[in-house]
Amino acid sequence: MLPAAKVSRLVDDRGHLRSDLATFGAAIAFSRKVRRELAAEIKAQFAAFRDSGLTLDHANGHKHFHLHPVVAALLTDIGASFGLRAVRVPLEPRRVLRKAEPVTPWSAAYLTAPFARALRRRVRARGLIAADHVFGLRWSGQMTSGRLCALVRELPEGLSEIYLHPATGPYPGSAPGYRYREELEALTAPAVIAACRDPAVRTGGFSEFCMRRTRANSSHSSGAGPLSRRA
C-alpha cells in the first residue's frame, strides 16, 4: 500500500513485495529498519481495508507468512486497533485428511506446525479467535467437490476453517496447476450443500462465531456454546 520508496527494504526491483521469503524472514528478525517498514506497511494495509467499508472478518498472511513471530506480533498488535477479532492459524490435522482420502501423502506444511502452535497461543492470549483446525493446506488449489464433501462429513469437534481459491479460471499471476473452476464448482455442489445441512454442523464466517462467543460470554455461559460444535 505504501510507496515503494517508503518500504524499500520490503520490495524488489519492480516495486513488488519480496518473494524470497527465507531471506526476507531473516531480515525481519535481525533488522530494526526492516521491522519499522513492515509495521508501517501492515498498518497501511489495515487502514486501506477499513476505508473500503468492508467488514473485517479475519486476517492472515500470503503463504501464511504471518507464522513468522515478528509478523505475528505486528499483525495482532496493529490489528487490534482496527477491530481485528480472528486470525487464521494453519494447523491441519492429517488424521482428518486421511479419513476423507485414505491415500494422502505427507505434506511439508507439517514442518511449520511448531510456528503455528506458537501463533495460536499468541492469538488466543490476546482474546482473538483462531479455529481449532484449518483445511486447505495439503489440497491447496485442489479442493474438488469430492474432497470438500468428505472433509465436511469428517469434521472433528470444534471450530474448523476450510479455505479455497474459487475462480472461473486461471488469470494473470495465478498459481500454476490450481484447479480454480473446480473449486468454485465445489462450493455449489449438491453433495457439499447436503453435507453442510447436517444438524451437527454450523456454518459461517469468523464474524458470526465472534458474535456467538460474545453472546455466550454476556450470558455467563460456562461452555463454548456453538463454538464447541462442528463448524
Image (cartoon, rainbow, N blue to C red):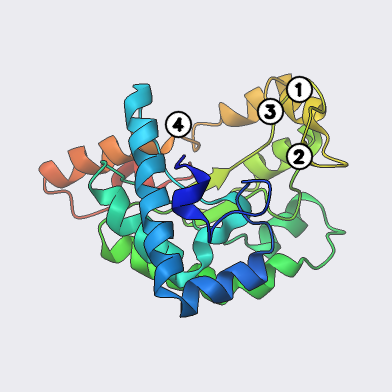
Picture coordinates of residue 103, whole percent (x, y)? 87, 59
From the viewer's perspective, tell me whether residue 53 is left or right of residue 151. Answer: left
Give SS at disc 2: loop
Q: Quadrant of residue 18?
A: bottom right
Say whether residue 1 is visible: yes
Q: CA distance from mark 1 to mark 3?
A: 10 Å
| Residue located beneath label 4 in the image | 204
Q: Amino acid at mark 1?
A: Glu
Say whether marks 4 and 2 touch (CB < 8 Å): no
| Residue located beneath label 1 in the image | 185
Q: In the image as oriented, which residue stretches furthest toward the bottom?
A: 30
| Residue located beneath label 3 in the image | 192
Q: Compare marks 3 and 4 and give the one earlier in the sequence.
A: 3
Say whether marks 3 and 2 touch (CB < 8 Å): no
Q: CA distance from mark 2 to mark 1?
A: 10 Å
Residue at (46% x, 66% y) in the render: 34
- Rendered view: 32 above or below 206: below
Residue at (52% x, 46% y) in the render: 4
